[in-house]
Image (tube, rainbow, N blue to C red):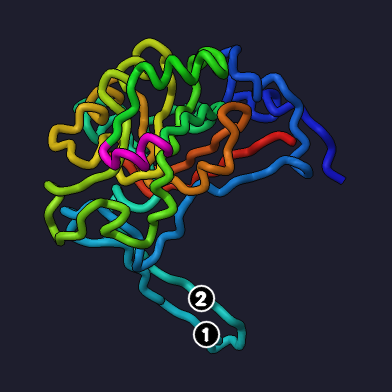
Amino acid sequence: MMRRFDFRRALLGAILGLGASSSALGQSLDLASARIIDLTHPFDSKTIYWPTSPSGFELKPLFNGVTKGGFFFAANSFCSPEHGGTHLDAPRHFAQGHWTSADIPIERFVGPAVVIDISAKAAENSDYRLQPEDIAAFEAAHGRIGEGAIVLLRTGWSTRWGDRKAYLGDDAPGDASHLHFPGFGAEAAALLANERRVRMIGLDTASVDHGPSQDFPVHRIVAAADVSGLENLANLEQLPPTGAIVFALPMKITNGTGGPARIIAVIPR
């Protein structure tokens, strides 16, 4: 029988130093009754990558069957660009000399989730960008965003996953100049990274910058502050505005600028 435990103690090395306003960290959590939400799309031949990516996800069987020794064995090889599907952008992606995937301190992969819902605005304007006033409205309703939070932007775009044109706004091969989807605005990103000092931002679209962007200001702002980005998230509609804890663990790639990640949220009941 699983006993109750103090989540802060169990994750001592991972969550010490998070903002005191993050109420999830002051709770005991019974994993037998907690809800665990998968925020990750599966990786397969249909996984969506940036239009200029030279390839997508490839899985090749190495062996699948009964060996000469009479027992079953299966193994595959896979190949994937760093940036596609549900993945993490390391600061090095847009900031020279900043953390690679392998450099990011392990405690920064865990934090209390803040979920800002702009799905209604995004439904009216596919190029909508999160504004400082959206953050102000969220904080008026739910309290100030604490240092060390992981801020997730719910746009509603994950319902389009699997339909490349609907998800990206355009499906021209090799052309990223006509994309349309919502994202963070530069001023909002600066507020979160430099004033609220969050440790990650993320959303359910292909980029933390909105689709039409050609100079990626949000990527550059957060990377310069060593704030990582999470892109192509799933199931954000299942998370409350506050109270969940996110675990976002990418592949530990030496010199990596990002990589595929398995991302989950834990919600105390």
Above or below residue 210? Residue 197 is above
Part of the protein shown in magenta: 119-127
Front residue of this view, candidates 96 and 162: 162
Q: Is residue 219 visible?
A: yes
Query: Where residue 204 is drawn, which disc sits there?
Result: none
Above or below residue 6? Residue 58 is below
Residue 230 is situated, as x and y percent measured from the top left of the image, at 39, 38
Residue located at (60% from left, 46% from top)? 37
Front residue of this view, candidates 241 and 227: 241
Which SS type dominates the magenta stretch? helix
Residue 233 is situated, as x and y percent measured from the top left of the image, at 43, 45
Above or below residue 13? Residue 231 is below
Residue located at (53% from left, 31% from top)? 110
For residue 219: magenta?
A: no
Query: Where residue 65 is drawn, which disc sits there?
Result: 1
Which tag, 2 or 1, sits closer to the chain's start?
Answer: 1
Front residue of this view, candidates 254 and 169: 169
Q: Is residue 14 visible?
A: no
Task: Please tell me whether mark 1 sits on a helix, a strand or a loop.
Answer: strand
Count of residue discs: 2
- Distance from Cα at disc 2 to Cα at disc 1: 6 Å
Q: Quadrant of residue 225?
A: top left
Residue located at (32% from left, 67% from top)? 58
As shown in the figure, which amino acid type bears the numbered disc 1? Gly
Query: Where residue 74 is drawn, which disc sits there?
Result: 2
Task: Name, please, the residue furthest toward the right.
Answer: 1
Residue located at (39% from left, 47% from top)? 157
